[in-house]
């Protein structure tokens, strides 16, 4: 049984890894291997399917808020250093 578990761990992401990749792919492109393993996980995990749908919905809502006329009058600003830190963590999470 130990070999099967090792193989599954290699082929599949955990839910934590899957949710991290769901969020990361909105900012940086995933590798082919990451995309395949993420798709495999999501196809078998109803919790991560729900998380993916909710994440996409939140992204759409945020984009609408950012692109709304009100936000153009008073834009949301973030320091360049903060942006750089976020991008670096998304590219290199560990």
Image: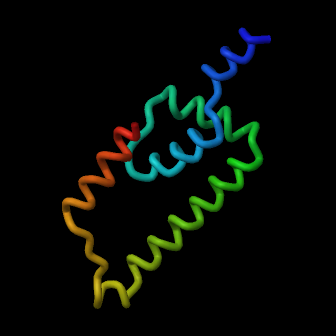
Instruction: Specify the farthest residue to the left.
Output: 80
Q: Residue at x 26, y 70 (%)?
A: 78
Q: Is residue 40 above or below residue 88?
A: above
Q: Is residue 53 left or right of residue 75?
A: right
Q: Quadrant of the C terminus?
A: top left
Q: Identify the colour scheme used.
A: rainbow
Q: Residue at x 29, y 46 (%)?
A: 88
Q: Residue at x 61, y 32 (%)?
A: 13
Measuring from the top left, give residue 62's x and y in whole percent.
47, 72
Measuring from the top left, give residue 69's x and y in whole percent.
37, 88
Could you say which is closer to the camera, residue 28 or residue 88?
A: 88
Q: Is residue 56 left or right of residue 7?
A: left
Could you say which is closer to the camera, residue 3 or residue 91?
A: 3
Could you say which is closer to the camera, residue 62 or residue 13?
A: 13
Q: Is residue 18 left or right of residue 89?
A: right
Q: Is residue 81 left or right of residue 29?
A: left
Mark count? 0
Measuring from the top left, give residue 87's x and y in whole percent.
31, 50
Could you say which is closer to the camera, residue 48 or residue 67?
A: 48
Give the quadrant of residue 81: bottom left
Give the quadrant of residue 86: bottom left
Measuring from the top left, give residue 14's x and y in whole percent.
64, 35
Q: Residue at x 80, y 11 (%)?
A: 1
Q: Is residue 13 above or below residue 47?
A: above
Instruction: Specify the farthest residue to the right.
Output: 1
Give the quadrant of residue 50: bottom right
């Amino acid at each position: 049984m130990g070999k099967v578990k090792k193989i599954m761990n290699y082929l599949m992401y955990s839910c934590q890894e899957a949710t991290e990749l769901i969020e990361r792919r909105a900012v940086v492109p995933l590798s082919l291997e990451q995309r395949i393993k993420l798709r495999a996980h999501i196809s078998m995990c109803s919790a991560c399917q729900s998380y993916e749908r909710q994440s996409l919905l939140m992204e759409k809502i945020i984009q609408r808020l950012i692109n709304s006329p009100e936000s153009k009058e008073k834009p949301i600003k973030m320091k360049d250093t903060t942006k750089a830190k976020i991008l670096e963590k998304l590219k290199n999470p560990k």
